[in-house]
Image (tube, rainbow, N blue to C red):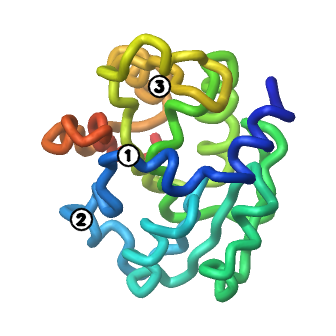
């Protein structure tokens, strides 16, 4: 993982309130039915805003993060499976029906995205599994874009589709919350 030390320092301290801005805690509220009765993995769970919204729907729930501090947050005490991520294409010990991540994609540097999609997501999703996430919001001031794993990596929708289309069939692209730092909600089924 490139820039690992700076990324770990940033995502292990002060990452909660500082990085939320006007982002809604449950941008996927219209799509909660995707979680019902599923084995779910959340990547980059922060302090658990999304986790709290869908835990009661899932059959099982796991979290994965690059930070030990995030995984040790008391909100995740009931989570049985926690994965410390050390590389973008990491293979876990089980597969999931649904992998979701919110406000995370834009913190994956461009040189790690293919490994994350073609490695991590494909290896760790069951056959016909679902991926759900939000695309980057592209209207930040110019200094916010650094492609370093801390600041925002600027991915256009075309770039997102270029990486995801070979591996996922897009079921939904919803831009109704775009103005709230949310980008577009993407829901795709593993091909």
Image point 51% across, 48% down: which residue? 18
Helix, strand or loop status at disc 2: helix
Question: Is residue 64 rendered to the left or right of residue 162?
Answer: right
Q: Which residue is mark 2?
A: 29
Q: Earlier in the sequence, mark 2 or mark 1?
A: 1
Q: Please provide percent x and percent y for residue 139.
A: 30, 21
- For the image, the number of numbered tags is 3
Q: Which residue is mark 3?
A: 166
Helix, strand or loop status at disc 3: loop
Question: Is residue 144 rendered to the left or right of residue 115?
Answer: left
Mark 1 is surrounded, within 10 Å at the Cα level, by few (under 14), some (14 to 19) or many (20 or more) other residues, namely: few
Quarter location, residue 149: top right
Q: Earlier in the sequence, mark 3 or mark 1?
A: 1
Question: Is residue 88 rendered to the left or right of residue 139?
Answer: right
Q: CA distance from mark 3 to mark 2?
A: 27 Å
Q: Which marked residue is nearer to the observer: mark 3 or mark 1?
A: 1
Q: Please provide percent x and percent y for residue 55.
A: 46, 80
Image point 46% across, 40% down: which residue? 191
Q: Which residue is mark 1?
A: 21
């Amino acid at each position: 993982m490139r820039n690992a030390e700076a990324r770990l320092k940033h995502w292990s301290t002060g990452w909660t309130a500082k990085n939320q801005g006007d982002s809604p805690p449950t941008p996927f509220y219209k799509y909660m039915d995707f979680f019902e009765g599923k084995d779910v993995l959340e990547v980059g769970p922060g302090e658990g805003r999304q986790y709290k919204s869908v835990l009661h729907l899932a059959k099982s729930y796991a979290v994965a993060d690059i930070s030990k501090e995030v995984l040790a947050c008391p909100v995740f005490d009931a989570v049985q499976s926690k994965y410390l991520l050390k590389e973008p294409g990491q293979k876990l010990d089980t597969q999931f029906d649904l992998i979701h991540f919110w406000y995370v994609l834009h913190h994956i540097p461009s040189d790690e995205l293919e490994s994350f999609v073609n490695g991590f997501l494909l290896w760790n999703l069951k056959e016909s599994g679902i991926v759900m996430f939000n695309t980057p919001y592209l209207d930040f001031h110019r200094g916010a874009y650094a492609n370093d794993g801390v600041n925002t990596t600027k991915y256009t929708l075309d770039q997102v589709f270029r990486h995801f289309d070979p591996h996922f069939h897009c079921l939904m692209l919803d831009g109704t919350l775009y103005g709230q730092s949310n980008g577009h909600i993407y829901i795709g089924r593993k091909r």
